[in-house]
């Protein structure tokens, strides 16, 4: 009887744990977390060559992000579910994972045209984080926490979706810029992350060199 | 004793009428219940405030019907709304100074929006869709959200943006 009780309690605890466990989605791009500096801007121009295929239930996205020890703010685009439908939207998301609350996401009514480039700027002023698309505000969130890292990523929910970028047209992240403890840094330092289904072209990216870029394609397309 | 009971009944009836007040923005959509003003909102007003949104009681009826707003919202966000099992309509004056990414259509059809370039006490519908899942950006954690909301300009019927938080 005691054994059954212990097993039952273990099962409940395990289910609670696994339902909130972190599980990284497939992603490709670069990121950095610092123990010395804080960041108030993550900016990039992202070229979306063609809309990636996204079969239900899945989504594909590209973004710039500022992140702290328990939160992130990000701005980019998202395409979901439909393989052919033009349902790509600009998107902003704020998430504080120190609470049990869900993320707060806001979507524009439109997104980037195919084969177009747009700038995505996650920016902090005072105690508010802002998201800009081509210098137009999409949303903001007040939070009294420093960002200690940044990300420039493409990400997919699962392998029903493709990364943007194909063999005939790569997605391009260019004009990268962060503000690091008040100083503007062009082509900031990045740790590269590549999913097995994606190829990352980083040869033309040199840290601290103005105007460098990196490219991404999905290996399946 | 009977007078006291009667008085209580009158108070209870008046109160229930007060809290369940709805505005029907268009006679042609009388069958669609629309909940107006923050006092009748089902939203978490604190979460809305976190996203820069403030609701106030509308002073006039909407120019477009809820069914037109719904049709346009479905068309603008087809992937997010197509598998919805239920919808709820609210009608408010909305202020949101944190969203400026208006479509050309939204600006062209509403001169006030175009001249002010911000959502300032704008009559809007908030259509809340019950959905099986919400496509947010990946968080590395299980996303339990089941509601997708579309904000529609109630003067023109043009969707302005969408949001999700629960």
Image (cartoon, rainbow, N blue to C red):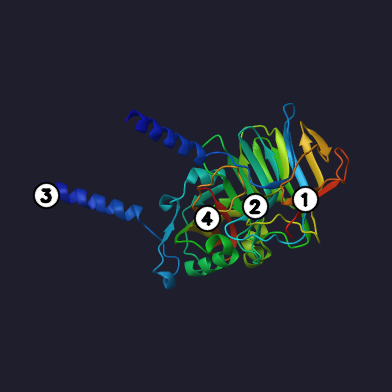
Q: Position of residue A151 (x, y in %)?
A: 72, 41
Q: Nearer the viewer, residue B125 or A84?
A: A84
On the image, which quarter does residue B107 sit in? bottom right
Q: Nearer the viewer, residue B33 or A41?
A: A41
Q: CA distance from mark 1 to mark 3?
A: 82 Å
The chain letter under disc 1 is: A
- According to the picture, the residue beneath numbered tag 1 turns out to be A199
In the rendered image, residues at marks 1 and 4 fall on the same chain: no
Q: CA distance from mark 4 to mark 3?
A: 49 Å
Q: CA distance from mark 2 to mark 4?
A: 14 Å
Q: Residue at x 51, y 70 (%)?
A: B68
Q: Give whichever of discs 4 and 3 has the lower sequence position.
A: 3
In the rendered image, residues at marks 4 and 3 fall on the same chain: yes
- According to the picture, the residue beneath numbered tag 4 turns out to be B148
Q: CA distance from mark 2 to mark 3?
A: 61 Å
The chain letter under disc 2 is: A
- Please name which of the two marks, 2 or 3, marks the residue nearer to the observer: 2
- Please name which of the two marks, 2 or 1, marks the residue nearer to the observer: 1
Q: CA distance from mark 2 to mark 1?
A: 24 Å
**Compared to B76, does A9 lie above or below?**
above
- Apparent side of residue A65 relative to residue B160 in the rendered image (left or right): right
The chain letter under disc 3 is: B
Q: Position of residue B11 (x, y in %)?
A: 25, 50
Image disc number at residue B82:
none
Q: CA distance from mark 1 to mark 4?
A: 33 Å
In the rendered image, residues at marks 2 and 3 fall on the same chain: no
Secondary structure state at the residue bearing disc 1: strand
- Apparent side of residue B61 relative to residue A35 in the rendered image (left or right): left
Q: Are marks 2 and 3 in contact (CB under 8 Å)?
A: no
């Amino acid at each position: 009887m005691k054994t059954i009780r212990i097993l039952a309690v273990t099962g409940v605890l395990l289910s609670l744990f696994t339902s909130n466990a972190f599980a990284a989605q497939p992603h490709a791009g670069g990121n950095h977390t610092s123990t010395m500096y804080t960041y108030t801007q993550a900016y990039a121009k992202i070229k979306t060559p063609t809309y990636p295929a996204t079969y239900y239930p899945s989504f594909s996205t590209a973004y710039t992000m500022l992140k702290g020890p328990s939160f992130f703010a990000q701005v980019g685009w998202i395409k979901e579910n439909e393989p052919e439908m033009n349902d790509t939207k600009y998107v902003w998301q704020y998430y504080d994972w120190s609470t049990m609350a869900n993320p707060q996401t806001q979507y524009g009514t439109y997104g980037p045209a195919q084969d177009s480039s747009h700038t995505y700027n996650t920016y902090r002023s005072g105690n508010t984080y802002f998201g800009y698309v081509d210098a137009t505000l999409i949303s903001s969130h007040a939070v009294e926490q420093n960002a200690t890292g940044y990300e420039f990523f493409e990400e997919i929910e699962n392998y029903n979706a493709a990364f943007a970028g194909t063999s005939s047209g790569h997605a391009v992240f260019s004009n990268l810029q962060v503000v690091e403890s008040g100083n503007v840094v062009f082509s900031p330092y990045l740790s590269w992350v590549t999913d097995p289904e994606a190829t990352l072209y980083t040869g033309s990216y040199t840290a601290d060199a103005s105007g460098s870029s990196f490219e991404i394609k999905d290996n399946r397309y | 004793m009977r007078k006291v009971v009667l008085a209580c009944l009158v108070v209870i009836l008046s109160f229930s009428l007060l809290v369940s007040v709805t505005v029907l923005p268009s006679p042609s959509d009388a069958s669609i219940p629309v909940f107006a003003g923050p006092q009748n909102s089902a939203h978490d007003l604190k979460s809305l405030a976190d996203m820069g949104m403030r609701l106030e009681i509308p002073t006039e009826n909407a120019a477009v019907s809820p069914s037109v707003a719904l049709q346009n919202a479905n068309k603008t966000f087809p992937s997010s709304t197509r598998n919805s099992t239920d919808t709820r309509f609210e009608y408010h004056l909305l202020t949101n100074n944190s969203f400026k990414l208006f479509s050309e259509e939204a600006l062209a059809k509403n001169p006030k929006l175009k001249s002010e370039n911000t959502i300032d006490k704008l009559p809007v519908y908030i259509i809340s869709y019950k959905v099986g899942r919400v496509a947010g950006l990946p968080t590395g954690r299980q996303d339990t959200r089941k509601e997708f909301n579309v904000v529609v300009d109630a003067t023109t019927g043009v969707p302005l943006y969408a949001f999700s938080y629960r």
